[in-house]
Structures are given as C-alpha cells and as structure tokens.
Amino acid sequence: LCLIIYTTIYTTFHATHTLSTMSADDPAASALEEEAAQLDGYFSDAPLDPRPKYPPLDTSFNRCVVISNLPKVPDSKLDKLRKVVLKLVTRIGPLASYDGDDAATDDEPTSFLLPFDQASNSTVGCAFVEYESAGDAKKATEVLEGYKFDKNHLLKATLYTRTEELREIDEDGDFQQPSPEPYKEKPNTMEWMEDSCQRDEFAIRYGNETAVLWNDGKSDPAVDYDGAREKKAGINWCDYYVQWSPKGSYFATLVPSKGVILWGGKNFEKLARFPARGVDFVVFSPQENYLMTNNNDRNDPEAIKVFSIQTGELLRAFPLYPRDFLPDDPSEAQQIPPPPFQWSYDDNYLARMGTDLISVFETPSMKLLDKRSLACDGIREFQFSPKANIIAYWAPEHKNQPAHVDLIEIPSRKKLRQKNLFYVTKCSMVWQEDGDYLGVKVTRHTKSKKTLYNNLELFRVNQPGIPVEMLDVKDAVMAFAWEPQGSRFAILHAENPTSTKVNVTFYDMWKQVEPDKKKGKNTSADSNNNKQSQLLAEVTKVQTLENKQCNCLFWSPAGRTILLAALGDSASGTLEFYDVDSRSLTVKEHYRANQVLWDPSGRTVATTVSQPIGGGHFKFAMDNGYILWTFQGKQIHQASFETFYQFQWRPREKLSSKAEIDEIAKNIKKYERQFTKFDEAKRRRQRLEETKGKRKLRSEFRATMARLREWRARQKVERMELLGGYDSEDEDNFVEREVVVETILSSKEELVY
C-alpha cells in the first residue's frame, strides 16, 4: 500500500511538474491536467512516511540450539538422517515458523539446518535448530545432552549463545587455575548408629511440634532433638509430615509452601533443600542417592520431581499421570489413582506403569531404557524385586490371552518366567524381604462369575527354572505376610470375608524330612548324617490359630514373633503377640489403634492412634497417642496428645550378614553375659543419677557435723575452766546403773469353761 501511495504521489508530482513545462496548447498537457484534477482531494494533508514498519529484530539467538556428534552420512542417506533428527527435535517442542516463508516445508523447515559439505560429499556431524520459545530450547539441551542416537553416537546439545561465548575465549591467553573453595566437613549422617547403648530412634509429629527420641526397649524414651534451634529462631521445624530415608541417614521435613528440607548428623543440621511447592509426600531411593517429591496436582505437568541428593540437581519432572492413561470420561478419571513410581533395589532404575506398558528410566540420566518402554499388554500392577533387578507384573485376560504373572529381568528384558492363570478377578503380589520368594494371592471366579475363591501362587525365584507351587485355600484370604529373612508365611482367612472371627495359618516353603533309619550297624559318619534332617522344597502347613479377633498381620523384623492386630474404628483393638517357635501367646489391647510399627531390631513395637494433618475434627481425639511394647507384649511407655499425626521409626541398615547373625545366635550365651554386665553398669549409673540429690545433701550434712565437732573441740579448754576443771566429756566422771522397767503394753482376758 505504501508503495502504491508513493507511486501515485510521484505520478501526480511528475504530472504537475510536466504541466508547468509544457505549453497550454499541447494535447499531452491537457490530458495530464485532467488526470491531476481527478486526483485532487484524494490525499490527506497529513505528512506520510512511505518507509515500511518491520517487527523488531531478535539478535539474542536464545531459541537456537546446536546439536553435535551426529553421524556423518553421504548424500544418499541425507534425507533419512534429516527425517530422523527432525522427528527427534520436534518431540521436544514446535520449531519456529515465519509468515510468508514459501521455501519452508514440513520435511525441511527453514528453522532446521543440517549442513552438508559438497567437497567431501558428507554431512559435517552437526545441526542447527530454532524453537518457538527459549524454554523449549533450554529443554532440548537437557533432553538431548548425552542422548544415545545409536550405538556409536552420543549427542551433544548446546545453546547457540553458549557457542558465541566459547568463540570469544582467548586461546592464546594465560590460563588461571580457579581457587578451590575451602573444605567444609559434612556432618556424619551415620553417627547415631555408634550409640553405646545400641538404642533405636523414632520421630513423632503432634500439634505444632516435631521430636526425635531415643528408645532402648526397657525404659521411657529420651529426647534427642526437638527443634530447639528452630524454636529459638522463631520458626517451626516442620509444618507437615516427616520421612526417614531407607538407611536412616537423612530426616526429611515437608514444608508445602517451599519444598523439602533434609537434616542429618549429630545435631540434625540442615543438609539440603529441594524446591517443590505443594509437596504432599516424598520417596527416597533404596540406596539414598535420589529423592522424589509429589504434590498430587493433576494439572501440574511437573507434579513429580526427581532430585539428586548429593548435588541437589533436578534430574527430571513428570506429570501425575502418564500420557493417554486416563479415560475420556472425567467422572471415571477422578476415580483412578495415579500409578506409583518404583525404584530398583540398587537405584539404577526408576519405573512407572502406563497403558499396556512399563516405562523404565535409567539413572542418573533419567532417559528411557533403550529409548522404548517395556510392552505389557493389559498390565494392572508391577513390583520390583527387593534384591534383584527383576520386575514382576500381572495382567488380566486381554485380547484372547489368559491372565498371567510374568517375571522380567532388567535391563535385558528377558522373560524369566510366565505363569498363566484362568478365571481371574484380581491378583495381589507380595515379595519376601530377601527376594527369594514371590507370593501371588489370586482371586478367581467360577464360569458364572457368581462365586469367588482364592489360591496362592508361590514362586521360588532363586531356584533353576523358577518353579511355581499352587496352594488352594477354601476360605477367603484377607491378608498375606512373609516372615522377614525366613521361608515361612502367614495368611489370615475366614469363610466369610466380613467375619469377626478368623483363622491364621502358618506355612513353610520347605518341608523337614527325617532321614530313614538303616538297619544294622552304622559307622559314626553314617550316624551323624542320619541325625541331620533333610529339607525338601515343598509347601508345608505348620499350624493354624482358630477364632482370632484380628484383621492385620505384622511380622517382627527379627522373625519368629508375629503380631495379630485388630485395627480400625470398628475393631476391638486386640493385640496378640505370638511366638511361632515356642507357640506362646500374649494378649493385650490398644483401643482405637489404627497403626502397628515394629522397630528395625524387632525389640519394640509401637501401636498408635493418629489423625491426618488438616483433616478437620477427629472424632477419636481423646485416644490420640502411642504405646510402646516389647516383642513379648509387655508395655514400656504410653504417651497421649490432643492432636497426634505421625509416628515413624528410624530405619537401620543391616550391617551383619546372615552367616554372622547365625554365629551370634550360636554363641548367644557369651553375648548374654556381656549385655548382662552392661545392663548392670547401666542400672548402677541410673541409680547414682537418681540418688545424686540425696547423696549431695548427705555429704553437706556430714561436712557441717564435722565442722561443728572441730569447733566444739577448740572450746574444750574454755569450757573446763568455766566448770572448775570438770570435763563433761570424760566417761570416768559418770556412774552407770542398769535399771529394768517393765511396762504392760496390752492384756487380754479369756474365759475358759
């Protein structure tokens, strides 16, 4: 338009100028006069700037990324390489586009450049990409840095602005070694395990207070730290829940307005802080290398964050739900809980279930393993083995395939075992603590789907071929629990799932077989062999406890002892401490108890009545608190609070092997004498501490009496002079007489006929 107006002005000016130089009789002049008259009044009197107004020029290049270490390919493979790289970069974000750019196509946009060297007939191994936003460009550098393009090429991604900075570096200048920061010793996060009394610790949250206490399993708990330093500064140590790390090295306090704070060391010093606004809970990796936060916000694309504990770096963020996981119906979507992330035992992998797949991410890069998810049609649940990189998952009947339980090895994706199941309604998987066994509780239905029944599928994971045994249970199974570090398990079952009286049955994965007695004389070697019983890999019923009032099973971490508890608002709160070996039973009660927690050593167990934080009025507030019991059912300590939110034992890393534990058990008498001697010394110290005040008063009294005796002795000469030489303290001046006085204290008169 500006060009047209400018041309018209120029034409009019040229016509007027021409008219002034032509004669009036010239026909051409007459034509120009008529044209000028027609254009008269067409333009406004306002000044006109005919120059075009372009948008401001962006010279920052903060949306441009340089990708290097790409394969160098000839012209014949150029199109293929361009498509692969273009597909990779567009997954991160849209590329920049410009109006009127007729040369751009979907296969070759102008914001993507893959240089080609005509002289060598090959690409140069790099590419230039321009995104629509600087945020996408920064994200591209994070995603593509170290990306495994193929088996020979790991990509490098750099912002173009960074390349300009590198270009300005003076290579001929003198290099100056940066001075290292002064060394600052970090707190010893495992110092608490050096406690001379071998005590355990636990944390409690009540009211606005947070406290960490010592427990020796015999006396009342003692406070280790209660946030005194923070109270002095006028702040709360914790505003929400707390969480111990799996080995007890770190203590995490949640502050929803800010994030997560880690504490550790002897005085619980602040070690790190991780920004995670709205955090609802945290999960540590088993080896304490990573921390995962979750705010449970469905609309937050970064609801779940994974941090490195050592560096504090945010490794990756995830939405609450995987892509295409929720149904289209909003009402149905609200009922589906988010699939949880699970760590492998060695921190090498982090996995989450999606639709017909499991996404396994490698650490610390947090990239998808082999750039593809693990296909699992119809998957409903999966779990990592606690001692190996093995994933167990189950899927119902799907696409004409029967329901099945699979064991997959990671990272090879090798299928170790598959067990097909039929007429399955639901499955629940439970790993044994050492990963030796996997128990799957299967709820089946008849063909009519009107009747449900249970059976247990028991996998021997460490045996060749992973044999599976099926255990039929006629009753409904409500609970299943493995004995830690053992081969026994317990099930809670009843004919009716809603029954208040249930049975508890114990099984062993091994059957003890007595050796056959040989006739005739045996050598000493044969005699010793016959005395040793043999173990047969066969599920064996040990015993059944009938008509029990319980709904939960809790094995002691040390094994042997199990707590049968009736928890919940409508339950009786009955606690039955049962020794499976000696078959002794102790019955106690904690009314309204809703949680049972064993300490790591198995010496003490806590039962609590707690309420959720921010849950409004709690109708059982009068029962809030906790009780500590010995593993034999003796009450140690009880504490009540108006508002009680959380009780959590500090985990303890197992430093002794199974062989060392067996050796200690064999020589338990020797250690018993040592601990008896230690307990006597401890009681003596406690007794001295308790009588410290009395002993101080007694010492002061004795010192006063000695001072008075000394003062009286100094006055003896003066006292005798006043008495005319009589010494009142000389026993020879006294005469002793013995007088017997009889006094009737009581009398009784009795008539005898």
Image (cartoon, grey):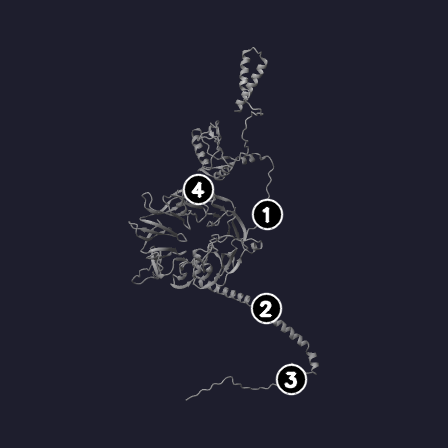
Which amino acid lies under the numbered mark 3 shown in the image of this protein?
Asn
> Is residue 412 in sight in this rendering?
no
Q: Earlier in the sequence, mark 4 or mark 3?
A: 4
Secondary structure under the numbered disc 3 in the rendered image: helix
Which sits in the foreground, 703 or 379? 379
Sequence order check, earlier mark of 3 and 2: 2
Query: Residue 682's mark?
Result: none
Identity of the residue drawn at 54% across and 50% down: 271
The circle on residue 696 is 2
- Measure how far apart labels 3 and 1 are at the Cα level: 86 Å
Nearer the observer, 296 or 2: 2
Image quadrant in which you'd find residue 751: bottom left
Q: CA distance from mark 2 to mark 1?
A: 49 Å
Q: Tell me the residue that label 3 is attached to.
A: 733
Q: Are marks 1 and 4 in contact (CB under 8 Å)?
A: no
Dot placed on the residue nearer the N-terminal end, 3 or 1 = 1
Residue drawn at the location 64% of the way across and 75% of the way down: 709
The residue that label 1 is drawn on is 182
Which amino acid lies under the numbered mark 2 shown in the image of this protein? Lys
Q: Secondary structure at mark 2?
A: helix
Q: Amino acid at mark 1?
A: Pro
Question: In what element is the residue under mark 1?
Answer: loop
Image coordinates of residue 716 in percent, x first then y, are: 68, 78
Label 1 and label 4: CA atoms lie apart by 38 Å
Disc 4 marks which residue? 368
Q: Residues within 10 Å of mark 3 (few under 14, many from 20)?
A: few
Residue 110: percent from left, percent from top? 48, 30
Query: What's the distance in space between the residues labelled 3 and 2, CA to CA?
Result: 39 Å
Q: Position of residue 501 (x, y in %)?
A: 35, 60
